[in-house]
Amino acid sequence: MTTNNEYTQNLLNHINLPADLRKLKVEQLPQVCDELRQKIIYVLSRHPGHLASSLGAIEITVALHYVFNTPDDRIVWDVGHQAYSHKILTGRRDRFNTNRQLGGLKPFPSPEESKFDTCTCGHASNSISVGLGMDVAARLQNITNRKVIAVIGDGAMSGGLAFEGLNNVASTPNNMLIVLNDNNMSIDSSVGGMKQYLLKMQTSSFYNRFRFCTAKKFSSFGLLNENSKNAILRFNNSLKSLITRQQNIFEGLNIRYFGPTDGHNVIKLVNTLRKIKDMTGPKILHIHTVKGKGYEAAEKDATIWHAPGKFDIDTGERITSTNNTPQPPKFQTVFGETLLELAEANNRIVGVTPAMPTGCSMDIMMTKMPHRVFDVGIAEGHAVTFSAGMAKDGLIPFCNIYSSFSQRAYDNIIHDVAISRLKVIICLDRAGLVGEDGPTHHGNFDIAALRAIPNLTLCSPINEPELRNLMYSAQLDNNPGPWVIRYPRGKGSTTDWRKPMKEIKPGTSQRLREGTEICFLSYGPLGVSVEKAINSLSPTMQSKVSHYDMRFAKPLDDDALNEISNHHYKKIITIEDGSLKGGFGSAIAEWLEQHNDYTPLHCMGLPDNFIEHGSVSELYKIVGLDTEAIVKTLNENLTPTTSNITIKS
């Protein structure tokens, strides 16, 4: 096994592109897999990323690039965090240590980065649909020799889009291959009926041999053509039921099924792929893999080692900060602890999460009250509509979804929750910029997307105690209808968060300071940065700045805004960790226009472009939302005095 100081790359150092890989003998491929595993473990121990998923997908990656003529043949990855070995084999080996860093390799496959990356794949369940589209495009353009392979794994088959894709694959002429990388995991353990089905699915070896020999005979007689294929597949299904006494959902859709087979035997995978690559019609290869394969600690606890941060390779010890100063908790930890506290006091409260119980800390309540927490798999739309059904009949669901993933539930929020004013509390974790996961995971569109929907209450806490207060307020009977509470990834700003919860009425803000010249209106945790910036000014300059933590983007605090309007400030400045277009600042602009208030307005927020990856602090500096940028804005808008404006260290 790899040590902290060295690892051998005798073959890998000579593989710059898949064409180099295909020059090797098949017997050399296990060594390539070993060297890839060593490199991924070594680099990620120092430069954190998604470890366990990529370790589990190494053999299938090598086999696919060895058998197929990439990039002319298309490999479509589903949940791109399983594709690190793909990056290394496709011209990015020497830059792999820059993965997820500012200016370095992108966190997930991206066509902007490499011609071997066929599509954006930060979210789950899109590979079958994308792959089918590519196969149809090749067919309609008479590109007869192109192969399309969709690699779907890490629980993505539980997503609704995957089933929609399968349904279309079954009815549209195509030759695509679907590789089902079945490791019984998403980030946490997979859940639901598909998991149970795949666990039970076995294919008789006699049946596979009989079917293969029969297909060869039919082909030699010229009988295996498009006209006869569906009838033969129906015969196969009947034969399989007799031999194995088991139905197969894929062959029931007329998709040829192969497997399950060992996903870590690279030579066997190569032989299997060679046998089926030229078969006409849709095919699915079901492989069993182990998430974290080859690194004992990751195999034992794939959830923790999904993205473990820095770690010591030899001991398996994760490296954390040695600072003994008490640190603020993560927002998601406060959410989890508060949800349990509320549920203990109110037996109508239930929890719903689409495959993220550990990530959002709903596992805290799940441990104590497993019958009242529902992990519905990678199915955000279902999570919302399922919550709506429970709310309709008297329960109070807290439905926790990562902000960027909630985009897939937009219609469900409108149609199933908002129209009927159902008491569903949607908690959007990872709002704002999330850092190294980049544009597919940044939560910068939810404010603008949801603000236009009637009947929703939209709020964001400035800190952890306010998150508790908003959660408490949302579940009270005198605050009816759906609430959306958004909060960022990571640590908050205070260690003193376990305070008694108090009610906050919708559309009420809090004035943090009163000044004479300009007024800052903050929405969410950036209000802490505003306070830090104001406190860095001289006392004279501080006295010129008012600051309101607005709390709610919908409804707005009319009383506070009337008070601000009557004050006749020199300028109003808004700040938010969301898209400027249509966001909180836009809401304030609309209010001012409706009330004939022409006070100059300056809005600070995220620009109208997709923001790349990097640390959160680096990204906020780039987009102009760090403390220095706030001080600069203050400096440009306050009446100068003899005192300089500086940031205190």
Image (spheres, rainbow, N blue to C red):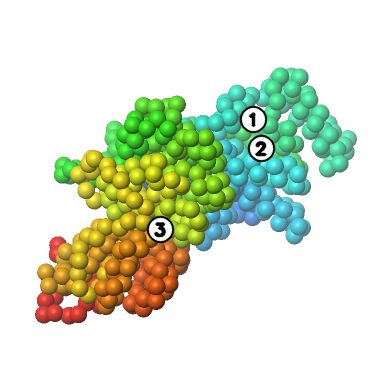
- Residue 101 x/y as whole percent: 36, 56
Q: Is residue 87 visible?
A: no
Residue picked out by circle 1? 259
Lower sequence index among marks 1 and 3 = 1
* Residue 523, picture quadrant: bottom left
Rendered view: 25 above or below 146: above
* Residue 177, picture quadrant: top right
SS of the residue at dot 1?
A: strand
- Residue 475 x/y as whole percent: 39, 41
Who's the residue at 33% across and 31% down the image? 345
Q: Nearer the viewer, residue 55 or 182?
A: 182
Who's the residue at 41% across and 34% down the image? 349
Q: Using a 10 Å C-alpha cutoff, classify the residue at mark 2 as few (fewer than 14 neighbours), some (14 to 19) or many (20 or more).
A: many
SS of the residue at dot 3?
A: loop
SS of the residue at dot 2?
A: strand
Marks 2 & 1, CB-CB < 8 Å contact: yes
Label drawn at residue 555:
3
Lower sequence index among marks 3 and 2 = 2
Q: Is residue 639 visible?
A: yes
